[in-house]
Structures are given as C-alpha cells and as structure tokens.
Image (cartoon, rainbow, N blue to C red):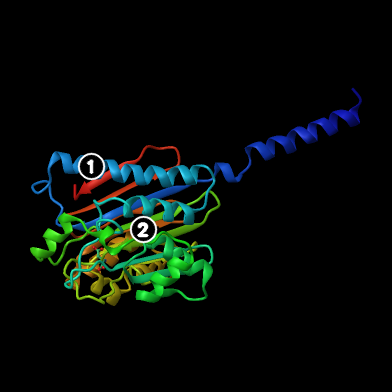
Amino acid sequence: MDFKLKVTIGLWTIIGLAILLGPNETQSNFAIAIHGGAGTITRENMTAEKELAYRFKLAEALNTGYTILKNGGTSLDAVEVTIRVMEDSELFNAGKGAVFTNAGTNELDASIMDGSNLMAGAVAGVKTVKNPISAARKVMEETWHVMLSGDGADKFAQEQNLEVVDPIYFYTQRRWDSLKKTQAKKHGTVGCVALDKHGNLAAGTSTGGLTNKQWGRIGDSPIIGAGTYANNQTCAVSGTGQGEYFIRGNVAYDISAMMEYENTTVGEAARQVIGKLSERGGEGGVIAMDSNGEISMPFNTAGMYRGFRKDGSPAKIFIYKN
Ligand code: ASP
C-alpha cells in the first residue's frame, strides 16, 4: 500500500472514531423527577395496600416519562405525558381525584414551562378539561398568552380538540368525604421536571388546589415562578404545598434566581428556599433539577410522594421523610 493511501485510511479511521466516541446526543444524560404532593403523609395513617398503590402509580408515571426521554423525546413531552398519567389516577389531587371547593365544585389549575426558551402556559379554574396539563401546553404553543382561566380556558381547550368531560367525571367519594370533614389542607398535587438528551429542561404542575378552598381561588400551581419554573441556564422546579405561601415567596423562581445570581447549587438553593418557606409558616416541598440532571427534593411536611429516574438507573420512589 502506498504511503498516501495509508495516510488517507489513517485519517479517516481517526475521524470515524472521533464521531463514534465523541460527545453526541445519544450519550448525553437525561433524567426525570416527579412529585405527587406533600402533606401529612405518615406511616401511621398509611395502609400497606394504599402505599403499594401509590408506589405503583408513581413508578408507572416515572417510567412513562423515562421511556420518552430514553427514545430521544423532549423534556416537554416527558413532563406533559408523565403528568397525564397522574392526572388520570384517582390517587392524586389533579385531574380525576381533584379536591372539591367549598361550593362542591372541582376547579383545576396547571402550568408547564420550557426551559430552552422560557415559554410557558397555564390554565386556572378549569372545570371540564380532562387533562389540564395538556391545556396548559396548548396555551403556551397556540396562543400569545401565558394563562387562561375559567370558562374561557375550558372553551379554548375544547376548541383545541382536547378531551372535555362532564364535571361529574372529577367526582370521587374520597375527596367528597374529605370536603365534608373539611380537611382544609389536603394535598396531592402532581408535578414533573425533566432533562432531555438535547440538554433542555422542562417543568410542569397540575392540581385541584386545596380542599374546601373558596371557589374561584387560584393557587401557585398555574403561576409561573411560584409553582412552576424552568430555565436551561439554572433549573426546572415544580412545587406542592400551601399555594398562598408559594405565591408570596415566588418559590420556584427563587430557587432559579439563587442559582443564577449566587451560583448556588440546585440542592442548596432548594433547601434554602424551603427553609424560608418554613420560617414564614408555609408548608410544602419542591422537586428541582439542574442542567446536569442533579436532583433535589426537599420538603417540610411529614411526607411527600416523590421519585426520580436517571439515565441507565432504576426508578427510585419515596414517600416519607426518612
Ligand atoms: N399548591 C397547591 C395549591 O395551593 C396545593 C398542593 O400542592 O397541594 O393549590
């Protein structure tokens, strides 16, 4: 073989190896984390059967989003579809299983945010949209607004061909009984944060709000910066807890801002912000993920349904503090 040919083959071998071994999309990290609400969730008031049902549904939701990310799907798709799984389950206070207002109605809130371009969408006080998280995404993608509320949002969802249901669909005996007992702090909101193989973060949150809330009340979950936030430069956050405190504290954005302005890690920022929430008398927790897939899930309640799954590792589900 002549020298020129040898050099050419050598060069092409090096280029080929560089393409194979160099950083490419399929090798980058991806991760997903979810919550199913924070509150007085203790071993004492949990049955083995109930715990299993929660663990099973949380794992199903987590694995659904994980598969989307593994196949190269976007974090936005993973967040939306994962939340839909939890909205369709009676176990959580979102979609089917939403709590009742003091007027005996179900009024649902949801929001979603794309960390790659800071676009966001939300719906508040909807009564007929089966999956409010999808309506939130439609607001983001199909309108120039960030939030639609009440009848206008329901009408918009219908026009977007999203599934609408009779309000009776949201009736569940368990939530009705809890309204009657007026357990004013019943939690169970759902949320998801994800990092996809393309390096983009997204976050979403969906809820029925607080049991026995004043009808017309809107919590933090549909408010960008309070219950949901995502920015590729910092982190993706979804919160759960007493919405009024989350709104006043700008909880989700506060975590992002600490990372942006003070170079704080996601773990430290999330812990500090939950610390501030406690000082102000608020209860709740967050799931937060940075652009490297680092995850933090602090809360100041007895428990928080939560879980995460990272590229190549099995799903991890937690309920209680320890
Ligand atoms: N944050 C929700 C709200 O205040 C409730 C919850 O997360 O449990 O509407």
In this rendering, the label closer to the viewer, 1 or 2: 1
| Front residue of this view, candidates 11 and 119 | 119
The kind of secondary structure element at disc 1 is helix
| Front residue of this view, candidates 156 and 210 | 156
**What amino acid does circle 2 point to?**
Ala
In the rendered view, would you say 145 is above or below 135? Answer: below
- Residue occupied by mark 1: 53
Q: Residue at x 22, y 48 (%)?
A: 319
Q: Residue furthest top?
A: 1
- Residue occupied by mark 2: 288
Residue 299: x and y, percent? 23, 58
Earlier-in-chain disc, 1 versus 2: 1
Q: Quadrant of ligand 1?
A: bottom left
Residue 100: x and y, percent? 20, 65
Residue 237 appears in the rendering: no
Disc 1 from disc 2: Cα separation: 25 Å
Residue 24: x and y, percent? 61, 44
Q: Quadrant of residue 269?
A: bottom left
Q: Quadrant of the N terminus?
A: top right
Q: Residue at x 33, y 60 (%)?
A: 268
Residue 242 appears in the rendering: yes
**What amino acid does circle 1 point to?**
Ala
Q: Is residue 225 left or right of residue 54?
A: right
